[in-house]
Amino acid sequence: GAGVSQSPSNKVTEKGKDVELRCDPISGHTALYWYRQSLGQGLEFLIYFQGNSAPDKSGLPSDRFSAERTGESVSTLTIQRTQQEDSAVYLCASSLGTGNEQYFGPGTRLTVT
Amino acid sequence: QKEVEQDPGPLSVPEGAIVSLNCTYSNSAFQYFMWYRQYSRKGPELLMYTYSSGNKEDGRFTAQVDKSSKYISLFIRDSQPSDSATYLCAMRSSSGTYKYIFGTGTRLKVLA
């Protein structure tokens, strides 16, 4: 079956612009996670959803970052007023339920110039 | 000190060797453990998912958890050049948040 998909695969934006990153989880997966991976770094947790609710947003770096999920399906991560330090690969993962094994998408590579 | 520590490598081994990859952790509440393989410019791919202590085997891969030492391992038998990738460990506790903590990854090179 189809895996987790993310779009766009690459995004180059100018400092100060807003960006939206999209994640389509595996059908039927109720939990969805966002991570950030910087060069040479591990995966940094950002937020996770159970259904359309976000019980843990503790990893969002600042109030410029927000995420939502609708229809217990697609999720959007929005970064407002992007900064150069936001440049990273943003990864989405989904799981059948919270705490189950996670399956990752290919990521969105964000470059802020 | 990070909650999860992983040697970044690179670890270079000849084809056919047995590879041992390891993570240590500080939180004794961690109960669920995962190993991922990540090729360059790709998303992580789940290899193993284990609960609590003990061993789990899947093909050429064996995951081992030693909770008393706060130490987990992934063994790869008969390593192949296609196993060359970065290996990430991840873990979480059985209570509270369902957030997984990831190691920074170990880069493995299997030489033909």
Image (cartoon, coloured by chain):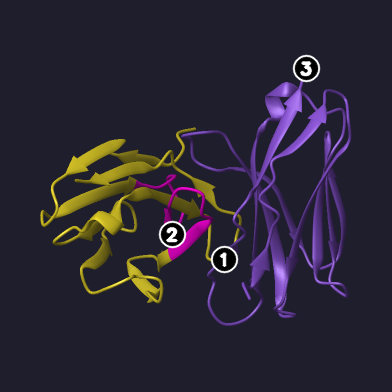
Chain colours: A yellow, B purple
**Quadrant in the picture for residue A63:** bottom left
Chain under label 2?
A
Q: Residues within 10 Å of mark 2 (few under 14, many from 20)?
A: many
Chain under label 3?
B
| Measured Cα–Cα span from mark 2 to mark 3 | 37 Å
What residue would you read off at disc 3? B112
Task: Tell me, for residue B100, which label it has, or none.
Answer: 1
Q: Nearer the viewer, residue B57 or A13?
A: A13
Q: Residue furthest left?
A: A17
Residue type for callout 3: Ala
Badge nearest the viewer, 3 or 1: 3
Q: Magenta span covers which residues?
A: A24-45
Q: In the figure, is residue B21 to the left or right of A99?
A: right
Q: Is residue B99 above or below residue A37?
A: below
| Measured Cα–Cα span from mark 3 to mark 1 | 34 Å
| SS assignment at label 2 | strand
Q: Are marks 2 and 1 in contact (CB under 8 Å)?
A: yes
Chain under label 1?
B
Q: Nearer the viewer, residue A61 or B29?
A: A61
Residue A32 percent location from the top left of the image: 42, 58
Residue type for callout 2: Tyr
Residue A112 percent location from the top left of the image: 22, 48
Residue A65 percent location from the top left of the image: 25, 66
| Measured Cα–Cα span from mark 2 to mark 1 | 10 Å
Discs 3 and 1 carry the same chain letter: yes
- At 71% from the left and 30% from the top, the residue drawn is B83
Residue type for callout 1: Tyr
Q: Are marks 2 and 3 in contact (CB under 8 Å)?
A: no
Task: Tell me, for residue A33, which label it has, or none.
Answer: 2
- At 55% from the left and 43% from the top, the residue drawn is B44
- At 62% from the left and 81% from the top, the residue drawn is B95
Residue B18 percent location from the top left of the image: 89, 35
